[in-house]
Each structure stands twice: as structure tokens, then as C-alpha cells.
Amino acid sequence: MRARRNKVKRRATGLCVRLLDRVTLQVRSGGEIVARVDGFALNLGKVSAAAADRAQELRSGVPLSSFASHKTSAEKQLEQLVRRLAARGLIEYRLAGQAPHKAPHIGDHIIIEPQLPDYWPRMQKLRQTDRLVLSRFAYLRRRAGEMVLESPRAPALFRIRNPEIAALLVALSTPQQVRALRRQTNFPGIELLALLIDSHVLFKVGTNDEGLRATEGGGDLVVWDFHDLLFHARSTEGRHANPAGGIYPYVGVIDSPPAVRPAWPGEKIDLCNLSEASTAADSAAAKLLRERHSVRNFDDRRPITLAELARFLDATARVGSIEKIPLDPARPGGPMLAHTMRPYPSAGASYELELYIAIDKCEGLPRGFYHYDAAAHALTLIPAHRHWCEALLKSAQSAMGEASVPQVLITVAARFGRMSWKYSSIAYALILKDVGVLLQTFYLMATDMGLGGCAIGTANIDLFAKMTGLEFHREGPVGQFALGRAAEAPASS
Ligand SMILES: Cc1cc2nc3c(=O)[nH]c(=O)nc-3n(C[C@H](O)[C@H](O)[C@H](O)COP(=O)(O)O)c2cc1C
């Protein structure tokens, strides 16, 4: 008994996993373990009595190293339980006790908050001669009463409560050898460095490499400005653990801004008489604009057909022609750039947007996840796992607050580099503007064809990366549109 207690005590240094403060674990009869969080109960499956006992240690922290050897079946079960808790965002990690005698507190007080559900800290081996530098995407900021170290590339954020670690980060703005870092009196321990590398907050560079923009990541990362990658990662779902969506966070804090802007003082020029006179002779375009509305509920007995989908894509997104123009028209003989013509406008004629189509019900087309080849006007099946396709469709369903998934879900993805290769500072903003233009094009064509559709404000960029195998910063979702045949509106009594 005493030997075991000693063991636990010794292990309490290093990297520990623990439950978030707002989570409690309960064991029900039969060994079922339930996590209670914010009034919800989440069933985590069955564990043995020994594993349930060990699970209570998660309140104060269980060393991650205890999972490495799996000496007992209880340890194996505990790791499985921790992975289930991790997938639901209910745990955090604490790095403690690696300090040298000169600064005994230094290794404490680093809390690691997972931002991706499948984050699992890994320690890369570091050699004395390795040179490390801070990523240009990493930043330290105040969050409530503490400092957090984050990066849009990182699967976790680091709560840093010790100024010595901030000083170390400043030193790492130029490459530093591990050997030299170790000699510093405030060295926080090799584990922290290894974890920061694992999270892309630090990266290794070669001998004569200063770790500047061109060195970090491949060509797909070079083209990203700091603020653009941060905006992309933080403004939709998938790569952060913050609340997202229409949760009305400021009810009771400030009044809702008015639906219509209060009028400017001053004399008004009345336009009503002028526009009313021409309403009788509304153009087809004006009628389409008036008729357009969002449709979230689809008639699953009469799904959209493949021919309709083909016509929809042809009219909205197909490449009409390809031409080559000089990069600088004033300099004939210089580099040439290829441009396409398509039905909707695009900033700089970049046409960086790609359409990925998840099918639930479409007559003539099997369920699955397809890429629309806009030049060939063809669909290519992407072998994405079925449960990911279902997750994609279900998240659209929940964004629309409907009882069933849409017949077709179009994910608008951007090839980011196509836009940022040309535009500095404004690339991501231009991409989002292009998405708006394309969504309205979809709305109008759906209305014209007697179909229904609805824009969807969020997309899970991590799920898309899993489905396509593409890194989130190479090509990723920036918009979604549900499409199908509208269910008939219930007859009004
Ligand atoms: C960018 C954008 C995002 C939207 N996101 C959602 C969404 O996530 N869920 C939803 O039900 N409707 C969404 N909508 C539809 C709007 O709620 C809808 O356009 C608005 O209520 C006006 O209604 P109407 O389109 O029928 O005229 C979105 C619309 C736009 C333009």
C-alpha cells in the first residue's frame, strides 16, 4: 500500500491529465460511468471497479506517463476513458515540477487546454544541438485574468502563469539551441519545449536558418498572413474550443442594436413614388430577388434529381472558358497567368472557391461526398468515411434547426493560396466576400429552378480536413449551402 502511494506521489510531476473544474464523474450501478457537465449527463461506457476508483484521481490529475506501460487492465480502461473525455473536450493537461533547484516554481502553472477534440499531447525527442524558434503564428494574449499562448496552427492552447516563461518565449523569437536554453536559470524543462513543438508553437530550424516566413511549413503556409490564418481558424467550427454560433452572449449586457438604423437627421429625397411606378413592369431578375427566400425543410419523398443538380451547377459555377493573360500587361513577354470565366464574379478573377457536395438524397446519384470539377463539369467521388459524411449533414441540419438533414449540402471550400499569392492583408476578407456572392448566386438559381436552399453560417474545418486529407490551411470550408426540393408548406387553416 505504501509503495503504491509513493509511486503516485513521484508521478505527480511531469504532464498530468485532469478533469475540467465544471465536470464531475459518477459511477452508476453496473460500472457505467457518467460525466456531468453544465446540467448534462454524458454516458462514457462501462469500466471495472478498479478503473472507476482510479478515474476519481482525474480530479487532481493523473500522470500521462502511467498510460505508457499499461501494466494493469485498470490503467488500460482509464486511458480509454480519458480519450473519451478528451473527445468531448472535458479534460485539460497540467505540466508541473520539472524545475531546476534555482527556480523551483518555474515548471508549474502551465495548463494545456485542448482545442481539437482528438488532441493528445506528444513529446518529440529533442537533441542538445536542435535549434528552436517561435512560430510567426504564435501569440501571447490576456484572457480574463491570465495569459494564454495560442496559435491558429496549434491543437491546444497554453495557459501561462509565470513571467519567466514569457521571457523564454521572447528569447525564442530568434533560433536558440536546446543546449543554450537548458543553461538558462529559468529553463522550464524539456517537456514544455517538446509540447510546444508538438503544437507548432515552436519549430526546428537548420544551422544557418533564421526561421523566417519561408522556412515555416511548406508553400501552403507561406502565403498566409498572420491575421488571416487566425481569422480562418477562430471564426468557424473545428479548431477551437470557444462557444460558437447564435448563443446571444450579450443579452442582459447591452441592448440589441436596432433592426433598422436610426435615420440621419436632414432633408430626405423620397424614392417611393419613383420605384412604385415601375413595380408593375418588374424584370425577371427583380421578381427572382423578391421571390428568393431560405428553405430549410425538404420533401424527402421527391428528392432533387441528378439532372437538376447538374443544371444548378452548370448555371452557377461551371467554368465557361480559360484564358491566359500577362501578369503585368505593361510588360509583354513577362509571366502569364491563367484565368477562368464563371457565372459569378470573383475578386481578381481568382476563382479560388471549390464546391464539395455531400449527398443524402438525390435521385440518380448515390449518397457520398463529391468534388465538383468545374472545368470538366463532372462530379468526382471522394472516399470519405460514411460517419464523417453523416456528421457533416447533421451539423447542417442542426444549424438550420430542422428535423432532417438536407438532400444536398454544398460545402464551399477555398484554395487559399490562389487568393493570397496575389493579395496581401486582404486575401481572406476577399475570399469571404466571394463566398457571399456565390451564395446569392445559389439562392437565385435555386429559386429560378423551383428548388429550395439555405446558406449556413458555419462549417467544421477540422472535419473537412479529415474527409479530404487536406491540411486545414491548404484548402478548407468557408461557406455552406443546403439544397433540395422544398417540402410543401402546411396549408394554413
Ligand atoms: C451568410 C449566411 C449565413 C446563414 N446561416 C444560416 C444558418 O446557419 N442557419 C439558418 O437556418 N439560416 C442561415 N442563413 C439564412 C438566414 O437566416 C436568412 O437568409 C435570413 O433569415 C433571411 O431570410 P430569407 O433568406 O428567407 O429571406 C444564413 C444566411 C446567410 C446569408
Image (spheres, grey):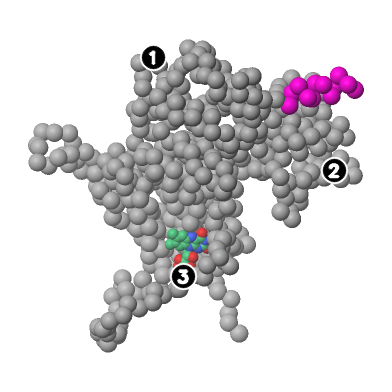
Residue at disc 1, secondary structure: loop
* The CB of the residue at mark 1 lies under 8 Å from ligand 1: no
Identified by mark 2, the residue type is Val
Q: Which residue is mark 3?
A: 257
Q: Left or right: 29 with respect to 79? A: right
Rounded to the nearest angstrom, the CA distance separating label 1 from label 2 is 54 Å
Residue 296: say if magenta: no
Identified by mark 3, the residue type is Pro
What residue is at 24 percent from the left and 44 percent from the top? 339
Sequence-wise first label, 2 or 3 = 2
Majority secondary structure of magenta residues: helix
Q: Which residue is mark 2?
A: 27
What residue is at 58 percent from the left and 82 percent from the top? 492
What residue is at 79 percent from the left and 25 percent from the top? 8
Q: How would you rate the neighbour count of disc 3 (Cα within 10 Å): few for under 14, some for 14-19, many for 20 or more?
A: few
Residue at disc 2, secondary structure: strand
Sequence-wise first label, 3 or 1 = 1
What residue is at 35 percent from the left and 27 percent from the top? 212
Q: Left or right: 186 with respect to 263? A: right
Sequence-wise first label, 1 or 2 = 2
Which residue is the extreme one toward the front?
102
Magenta range is 1-12
Numbered circle sitting on residue 342: none
Asked if labels 2 and 1 touch by Cβ distance under 8 angstroms, the answer is: no
Numbered circle sitting on residue 207: 1
